[in-house]
Amino acid sequence: MNLYEPIHTPVVQPGAQADQQADSILDVRDLNVTFRTAAGTVHAVRDVSFSVRRGETLALVGETSSGKSVTCLGLLGLTPPAPYCTITGSARVTARDGNAYELVGTPERVMRRVRGGVASVIFQEPMTSLNPVHTIGAQICESLRIHLGMNVRSATDRAADLLNQVGISDPKRRLTNYPHELSGGMRQRVMIAMAIACEPSLLIADEPTTALDVTIQAQILELLEKLQAETRMAMIYITHNLGTVAEIADRVMVMYAGRIVEQADVVELFTQPRHPYSRGLIHSVPRLHSNRARKTPLFAIPGNVPDPTGHPPGCTFGPRCGHFEPKRCDAAVPVLQHAQPGHLVRCVRWPEIEGAM
Amino acid sequence: MPQNPLTSPLLQVEGLRKWYPLGGGWLGKPVQHVKAVDGVSFEIRRGEVLSLVGESGSGKSTVGRAILNLNPPTAGEVSFDGKPLVGLTRRQMRPMRRAMQMVFQDPYSSLNPKHTVEALLSAPLEIHMPELSLQQRRDRIDTVLKTVGLNPAHRSRYPHEFSGGQRQRVGIARALMTDPQLLVADEPVSSLDVSVQAQVINLLLELKQRLGLTMLFISHDLAVVGHISDRIAVMYLGRLVEIADAESLLNNPRHPYTRALMAAVPNLDPRERRPRELLKGDIPSSLSPPSGCAFRTRCPHAQPACANGVPELRVVDRNHATACIRDDI
C-alpha cells in the first residue's frame, strides 16, 4: 500500500452514527485495556466511556497508574500488540470531512492514516519524542507528505507556516535545526506544529507542559488555547496538575485506578467536587495566596495508589478514603451515577458526604 | 570566633561562584565559562527554612551542591556553624558532612536498587558513627523509620518495593540518620504525585518543628515554597534577584521576575480565568547572558538603563532586598 496516498477511504460511512450527537468528535464506549504481565493481569483501563465535542477541551486527570495515558495510547493503537495487551469496547472518531473511523480493533494500515491525520498526539517529553538525527523540518514534512501527499517544496512551505503559527520566529532557518539546538519550550512548540500539521479533528495532549518551566508552561497553554480557537479541534488534555486543568479545560474527567470516578463541567468540578478522591486532590494542591494556611499542614490523602495487579474489593479508593463505610463501600464497585445533569460520580456515599470535607 | 553561637547564622554563603570551563581541551586554556552560579550571597539562620526558587538553568541546584562541596565552588566563601568549608579536602570535609545532609529529587535514582533499606540507612552510620554497635544501629534505623512515617518492618525491603512517596521517605530517613543540623532538599517533591506531594511537604514541616532542622529547600514551584519557607530567595541565571521573608515576598514581590513566576502559578478557580501575563521567550543561555540585568530581555518593564551594569541586591524593605533598578513598578 502506498503510504503517500491521501486519506479517502473511511472505514465507517458518514452519517452512520454521527447524527446522534452532531458535534461529537470522539465517542468512547466501554473501553477496557488489559495488559498481561509477568506479575499478573493488569486492568489498566476499565469501562471508560466519554465523548468530546468539536472545539471542546476535556481534561483527563489522575495520578500515576490511574490509566489516563493508557486510555489515549489505547485509542490510538499505540499499546503493545495482542496477546500482551487486549483492548475492548468502541471508540469512534470523526474526521474533518465528516467520515467516522472506528479506533478499536482497526488494522494497523488504517490506524496509520488515522494517527496524525485525524487524531494526533503531543507527548510529555519533547526531547525523546523528536528524532535527534533528523532536522525538525524533515520531521514536520514527513507527515505532510504521507498524509496530504504534498511534494517537498509545498511541504516545506507549509512547515514554515506551521512554525510561524506556533510562535517560532525565523521559521525558514529553524527548519534546518536539529532538536538539540532548540530549548525545551521550542521543542514542545515543534511537537505541536507536527501534531496540527494535517489539521486533525482531535488533539491528544499527554502532559504537554510537565517537563517545562512554569513561565514556559504558561506560554504553551496559551498557544494550545489559541490553536484550538483557530481550528476548532477537540482536545483531550491529560495531566496530573489540577492547576492547569482549571485554566484550560471545559470538562474534567477524574480517573483513579483505571476507572472514571467523577466527570463534570470544570467550574462544577472545582466548586462542587463530589467524589472524596477529587475533593482530596483539589485540597492537596498548595496555593499561592493563602496567608492563613501557610505553614499549617496541607491536606494530604493518606496512603498510596493501589498496586495495579491487585485492586481492593469494591471501591478502589476505599482504603484511602475518609468516608469509607465497611460493607457498603467494599461490597461492590460503585456505579457511575448522575449527581446532576452532566455530573457523574462513582461513590455510594456522595449524597451523605456532601458539604463535609 | 566572637559570634554568639546561638544567634549567629548556621550557614553563611558569600560571593559564591561556580564556573564550568568550556572549550580548550588537552593542555589548552578554556575558551569560555558557563557561569552557573555567579556571585550569590545569603545566610540561613538556625531553625529556618530558606527556599531557593528558579527555573531550570538558574543555578539553584548548583548552589545546593556547592554548599555541600559536592561540586567545589570556583570562588566565594561558605561557612557552616562558623567554620569555613571551601577548600577543604574530602578527608577534612567528612566530619562536617555528618551535620549537613542532602535529600535528592528523584528517589528512583538516588537509592541503590541492590541495597535493602537497612543497608541504605546504616551506611551513613558506619561512616559517621562507627562507634555504634549493631543493635544501636538497628535501634536508630527503627527510630528514624518511624520518624518519617514508615514501618520498622520495612527494613528488609528493597527500594523497588516502595511507591514513589515511600521511597522519598526513605531518602529523607537516610539524610536524618546522622542527626544533621542542616538539610539541603533539592526538589524533594517534584517527582511525586499531588496527593503524595502533600504528605511529604507535611513531613518536612513536621521534621523542622520536631527536630529543629535548618533547611535549604530548592524548588521551582512557588506555591510549594510558599507553604514551607520562612524566607525565599529567587534566582535567575546564576544570581539572586530577590530575597525576603516569605510573607513579604509573596504579598509584595518587587522584582519583575518574581512577579512573573507568581503569575505563572495556575489559579485553581476556573471562574477567575483571566488573560495570562506571559514572559517573552526562553531563559537565555548562561554561556552568553545578556549584559546588565540578565532578565531585561524578557522583562516587561525593561528600560535602556537596565543594560548598564549588573544590578546589585539593594534593601527595599525590612528583610527584603531586590536586584532591580526600578522603584516605580
Image: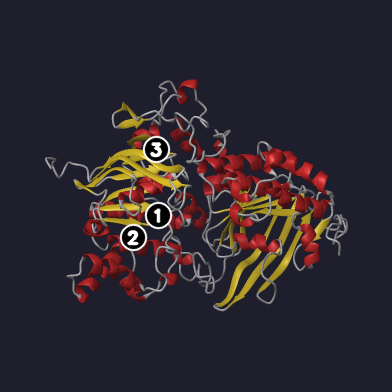
At 81% from the left and 52% from the top, the residue drawn is A145
Label 2 with label 1: CB-CB less than 8 Å: yes
- Please report, as a chain letter, where disc 2 is located: B
- Toward the left, the furthest residue is B2
**Amino acid bearing label 2:** Ile
Mark 2 element type: helix
Q: Are marks 3 and 1 on the same chain?
A: yes
**Amino acid bearing label 3:** Arg
Q: Which mark is residue B188?
A: 1
Query: Where does residue B93 sit, x and y in percent of width and height?
Result: 24, 56
At 69% from the left and 69% from the top, the residue drawn is A87
Q: Which mark is residue B172?
A: 2
Label 3 with label 2: CB-CB less than 8 Å: no
Label 3 with label 1: CB-CB less than 8 Å: no
At 40% from the left and 22% from the top, the residue drawn is B327
Q: Earlier in the sequence, mark 3 or mark 2?
A: 2
**Amino acid bearing label 1:** Pro
Q: Which mark is residue A73?
A: none
Residue B161 to residue A6: above or below: below
Q: Which mark is residue B239?
A: 3
A294 on left or right of A78: left
For the N terminus of chain A, the image quarter is bottom right
Q: Earlier in the sequence, mark 3 or mark 1?
A: 1
Q: CA distance from mark 3 to mark 1?
A: 22 Å
Mark 3 element type: strand
Image depth: mark 3 or mark 2 in front: 3
Residue A220 occupies quadrant:
top right
Query: Where does residue B316 sit, x and y in percent of width and height?
Result: 33, 26
